[in-house]
Image (spheres, rainbow, N blue to C red):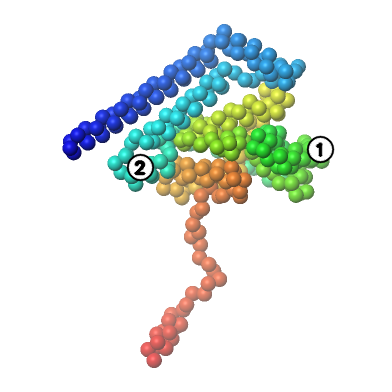
Amino acid sequence: MENCIVRHMQVWKRLKFELLCLQLQLLNQFFKIGLYLMINPTIQIRFKNILTLKTGLLFPNKSNMIRLRAHTIFLFIGILALSACASNSNNIALESDNNVNQDYLAVNDPYENVNRGVFAFNQAVDGALFRPIAEVYSLVPKWGRDRVSNALDNLGEPINFTNNLLQGETERAGSTLMRFVINSTFGIVGLFDVAEEWGIEYVPEDFGQTASIWGVDEGPYIVWPLLGPSNPRDSLGLVVDWLIDPMGFILTKDQSIARMVGNGIDQRTAYMDELDTLQQTSVDFYATMRESYRQYRNAEIRNSELPELIPIPSMTIDETEETPSPADDIDQIATSGN
């Protein structure tokens, strides 16, 4: 009887393993199809004609607004297939050990080996390029850097407004619209955050947060080259934000690139000291960054106060606390003896 049960369990595990392999093969085919469509000019022209016809109804006389491309659609398919594959693979391994399996699911990092390789690559690029640029930019007086940050935040208000509407947050959408109007006028194209001084708080929103409100699961942890930590939901949100961002239809290509580079440098400079401290105090910098990213995104989705990257224990001594002298110790011993 026991041999029969063991045999059935082995057959069941092998069947699930074969299903996983089939999913991986289907995923590979999706990416092959997407790659073919990206390099096939005929297919691209057909998609462009169709999209030009549809988007021309909403945005007439804006030829540079047609930024939707066929490969973005297949990127969505690839990400969703990747997420589905990962969610099924989580249930296959480590069934005999419930504790280990629960830890594995909690981490939700089935591609950890690949992610660590990409993370190491990003660290090398950061050390050779991004951090030196951030160090030079940090020499700019804080007043000047604040003006740049305010202007970049103001350019992001239209996409914040759009996502607030998609989330059904009409009141917050109205506040975002007021911020954009006030800072674009009284704040001199966003250089000064006048709306903040008037009590209208800046609340960033993106389509990853919107998808979470809609009930879309985050999926497995992913580290993208140069872009850093993410997951399928936030990766999809990044692409959707790029497609529906109203400022993308107004700014030129060079202006959009300058905006993207400016955002990257501004963020890298803002968190330079925190990241350095985090790296120096972490036993496993990769795992610490993974947990920090999830805490940060969860706080953004809940629109709560953003946490520190990782709480670092204080090693300082409270100088106000009086240290007992040896004489006090002798008196205390003598008193207790009596």
Looking at the picture, which amino acid does disc 1 mark?
Thr
Which quadrant, please, contains the C terminus?
A: bottom left
User: On screen, 338 above or below 318?
Assistant: below
Most foreground residue, 216 or 113: 216
- Left or right for 6, reference 286: left
Which quadrant, please, contains the N terminus?
A: top left
The tag earlier along the polypeptide, 2 or 1, is 2
Pointer 1 local density, CA inside 10 Å: few below 14, some 14–19, many at least 20: some
- Left or right for 153, reference 36: right
- Specify the farthest residue to the right: 186
- Specify the farthest residue to the front: 1
Residue 269 in the image: state x and y as whole percent. 60, 41
The image's mark for residue 185 is: 1
Residue 281 in the image: state x and y as whole percent. 46, 50
Q: Tell me what residue is drawn at x 32 percent, y 39 percent.
A: 94
Q: Secondary structure at mark 1?
A: helix
Most foreground residue, 336 or 76: 76
Looking at the picture, which amino acid does disc 2 mark?
Asn
Most foreground residue, 20 or 294: 20
Q: Tell me what residue is drawn at x 40 percent, y 32 percent.
A: 88
Residue 303 in the image: state x and y as whole percent. 62, 45
Residue 38 in the image: state x and y as whole percent. 53, 15
The image's mark for residue 337 is: none
